[in-house]
Every structure is written in structure tokens, then in C-alpha cells.
Image: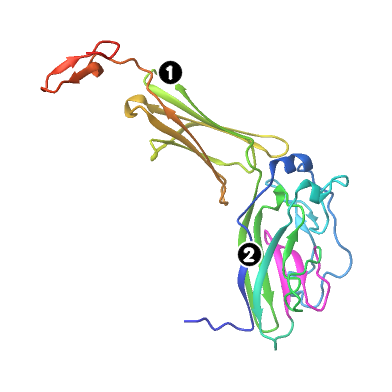
Amino acid sequence: MIPAYQSVHITNLNVPKTYVLDRSTYEAVGSSTLPPVQHEGDAGGGDGGADGDITTGLPMTSTTEENHLLPASVSTVPGDLNITDAGLKPLIMDCQYEIKARECGFVLKWYFNKKLIYQWIPSRTPVGMTNYSMSDSINYKYRALVIRNPKLNHSGEYMCSVQTYDSFDRRMARFQIVVPEKTLLLHYENDGDSDNMLLIKCSVFMIYPEPNLLLIVSGNLFLVSSRTLVTADANHMYNKTVYGKIDKHLLISPTSIGCVLTVPNSGYIRKRETIYYDPTPLTKWSRLRMDERGHFQLLSDDGAG
């Protein structure tokens, strides 16, 4: 059954789940931010409603405190670095909707982590960011949110709301910035505390945000980590290592050992795999061979009968 929409409704919220920054570009630009900037004057007026005054820009979020807002229209790229040369791709979030021609009082708003960052009324100039035209139609022209230089602190929850005097609709989606790892390593060795145990170690270096690391043995045996070490530098780049132990008697040589890296709230995934070979010398019983008459024969050390 086709839903009976009222005057305005969102048909699609095109917010990518993950945006992977190019590591070389990230290292060239860095993670520094500009001082907080605010627009002056009218914030769009008219249909302010319960949202009150509008502070424009994108918040520079932090896990410990609420920071000021930074306008998306302000480039955070150093003046001597050309955006095109650096290979920086703008991030476009599109809010697609339908509105009946007879409706009045239309206003579109974008929120980041529940804070209003952009507002557009067709009869006025958009507030909060660079004018980016998505359509020639007067009611759809400036519907998109554009971040010219995506940074780590742009990760979070984005919501688009559309309303007229008669109806209202909104949708939200989570978005995650990822700086890919510099190195992902997988290694195994004999456990120093027990000769019967195998110690498996998976390490990732220089990645954002903090990832999950999962150890896998024989393709489907998930190994519970016995220890985890996590560090982060001033630029929020993470180094993480997980350790796991398994009894060698549970392994059939050769056995595959893998490590799966995932970033929460994103589709980012990386894998490493190695093969475990039992280095134990052949025993007497492993050198038994059955001949064509069903009799066992002990092989010599070189494998000959």
C-alpha cells in the first residue's frame, strides 16, 4: 500500500556511511583546526520556530568537552596548499524530498549531533555554508550539505528536516571519517609461559578511529583476546594490539590464522592471514605406513621404507 504523504516528505537521505581519507593527504594537511568562527546578522529568520537562534557551522566535536562551531564554508586547508592539488574531495550529503506546489513556508535544516548547522529558505540565501546548487528548481536548489575539507571531527549523526506550514518530516544517518591504517601486522610464536600454547598477536598502527581487532583460527574459531593494548597520539591516531592464546593440540597443521580489523559504525574492514605450521619433529608413530597387504611398516628418518 502506497503511504499517503502530506505536503512535504523526504524520499532519500544520501549520507555516506564512511568517508576514507587518503593517508598521504591527511599527513600533508594534518588534523589542525581553525579558530571558531560565527556568522553575523540574521540567521535565516522567518520560520525559526522552537530552534531559536541559529549558530552556523560544523561543530568541532570532542569526547571531553563541547567545542565551538566552525562554518563548513571556511576551508581548513593551509593557504599554501591547493585543494585540487592535495586530492581532497568534497563531501556532499544530499537530502532529497518531495513538496506539493501549493504549499507555503518551506524551510530545510541540517543538524549535526542535534545542533543546527545549516538552514535554507528558498526566498533567502542559505545560512551556514557555501552555496552549492543541486538543482535548478527553486524549492530544491540548495538542499545539500557540503563539507569541502572533511576532517576527523566531522564524524557523527546528521539529520535533515523539511517542513512547511502544514507538515514536517526528518531523517537521520550516522557518518564516520576513517584514516586508514599505516600498518596491519599478524604474528604467532610459542607462548613463554607454556610450551603447549601458541601466542597470536595482531597489531595495527596509525589509524582513526579506534578499530576492533578479531583473531580467527581455522576460518571460524574466534579467539578471545587474552590482552589488549591501546595508545593514541596527539592527532588521535590509534595503535592497537590484541593477544590471543590457543592450545597447539587443538590445531591441525597447517592451520590458517587470521586477523580482521573493523571500524565501528562504518563499512571499513581489513584482513590479514598467515599459516601455522607445527614445527614438532616427526615421532615414531607418525612414520608408520601401511603396505598393500595391510601390514604396518616403520619408515626410516629419510622417509624410505
* First to last magenta residue range: 106-129
Q: Within the image, what quadrant is residue 10 found in?
A: bottom right
Please determine whether, in this image, residue 128 is positioned above or below residue 78.
below
Q: Secondary structure at mark 2?
A: strand
Residue 250 % position (x, y) = 33, 29
Most distant residue in the top direction: 301
Q: Which residue is mark 2?
A: 14
At x 79%, y 58%, the residue is: 72
Q: Within the image, what quadrant is residue 241 found in?
A: top right
At x 67%, y 69%, the residue is: 95
Instruction: Identify residue type, mark 2.
Output: Asn
Q: Dot 2: few (<14), some (14–19), or many (≥20) neighbours within 10 Å?
A: some
Counting residues from the N terminus, which is met first, the one under dot 1 or under dot 2?
A: 2
Please determine whether, in this image, residue 51 is positioned above or below residue 176.
below
Instruction: Identify residue type, mark 1.
Output: Asp
Question: What numbered label is drawn on residue 193?
Answer: 1
Quadrant showing the C terminus? top left
